[in-house]
Image (cartoon, rainbow, N blue to C red):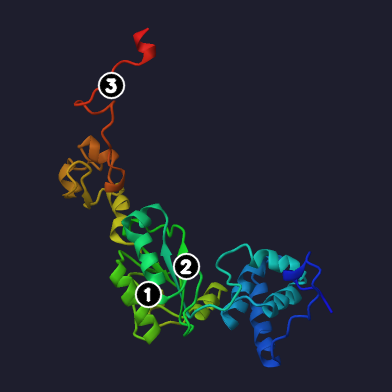
Amino acid sequence: MTTTPDSVGLGMPQLPAPDYPDDVRARLERDAREIIARYPGSRSALLPLLHLVQSEEGHVTRTGMQFCADVLGLTTAEVTAVATFYTMYRRRPSGDYQVGVCTNTLCAVMGGDAIFEALQDHLGVGNGGTTDDGKVTLEHIECNAACDFAPVVMVNWEFFDNQTVESAKRLVDDLRTGVPVAPTRGAPLCTFKETARILAGFPDEREGAVEASGSAGPASLTGLRLAKGEAARVVHPRDGGPHDAAQDRAPGDATPHDPSLAEHLSSHDAPQDTSASDPANPAGPTAEEGE
């Protein structure tokens, strides 16, 4: 008997990991050779190979880790160290759709915490739990770099922006019943296994995926448009209303004439009144100034 990576240090010998069926292993070996050939050093292929075996069973199994170790000439301990470090690799069976609710600061205060709590009750699962039908795995996730569209929910790494408790409930219900859903932006939705194969570096064969992917939303592009001297609507930091930045420009001038607008183009970082800037509440001299 051998000792598996999960039991190292515990003194618990276990049977070797079962192998893939011959036809499955032959197919994975062909794919693995293609992946390994992309790198000057074979061990650099470990990350995409873990995605490859994840695409086979929906999570990284002992069999998958042993396969990666075999084709790369690594120990199972080395493979396990990587597989357990990155959260995109699942270590236990999970759903066809990984539903992640951003609970980082902005999404949380905009409703992300409420969405996550409501979905736990609605689905009857906790963080990292999977519904009984195997369709949905729910988890809270960190910042998705989509703060302009908070609160954000991701399904298999595709964006669903500006969510509410009710829209998020409808989303997971549709996923469970097979009703087609479309991400707010980016490529069409696919299953987690299909996503894993794409992340392994194989072509995305979904219809319209290439044309739809890679686009940023209008809020994210506002700063870029202003930098190029183009007209863009922003939220004025002082009055909170939509504002045409082009009205503040002189001909050929790419910089708004309103100093507050130039320095604070986002409603999220609008200047706050402080004792140093609020005339109605002036601060007295500091102790050093009074001496």
Farthest residue, direction left: 247
Viewer-nearest of labels 2 and 1?
1
- Asked if residue 242 lies left or right of residue 200, the reply is left
Foreground: 53 or 163? Answer: 163
* Residue 227 place in picture, x, y as percent: 31, 47
| Residue on which disc 3 sits | 283
Q: Label 2: how many residues lie within 10 Å, few (<14), some (14-19) or many (20+)?
A: many
Spatial distance from mark 3 to mark 1, Cα to Cα?
51 Å
**x 26%, y 39%: residue:** 262
User: Which residue bears the numbered disc 1?
Assistant: 122
Q: Amino acid at mark 3?
A: Ala
Q: Nearer the viewer, mark 3 or mark 1?
A: 1
Quadrant in which the C terminus is drawn: top left
In the rendered view, would you say 13 is above or below 274?
below
Structural distance between the alpha carbons of marks 2 and 1: 14 Å
Q: Earlier in the sequence, mark 2 or mark 3?
A: 2
Element marked by disc 1: helix
Under circle 2, the secondary element is strand
Give the CA distance from mark 2 to mark 3.
47 Å
Give the residue type at disc 1: His
Quadrant for the N terminus in the image: bottom right
- Left or right of 269 on screen, residue 105: right
For the residue labelled by badge 3, is the local secondary structure a helix, a strand or a loop? loop
- Residue, disc 2: 139
Asked if residue 110 lies left or right of residue 145, the reply is: left
Tell me if residue 213 can be seen.
no
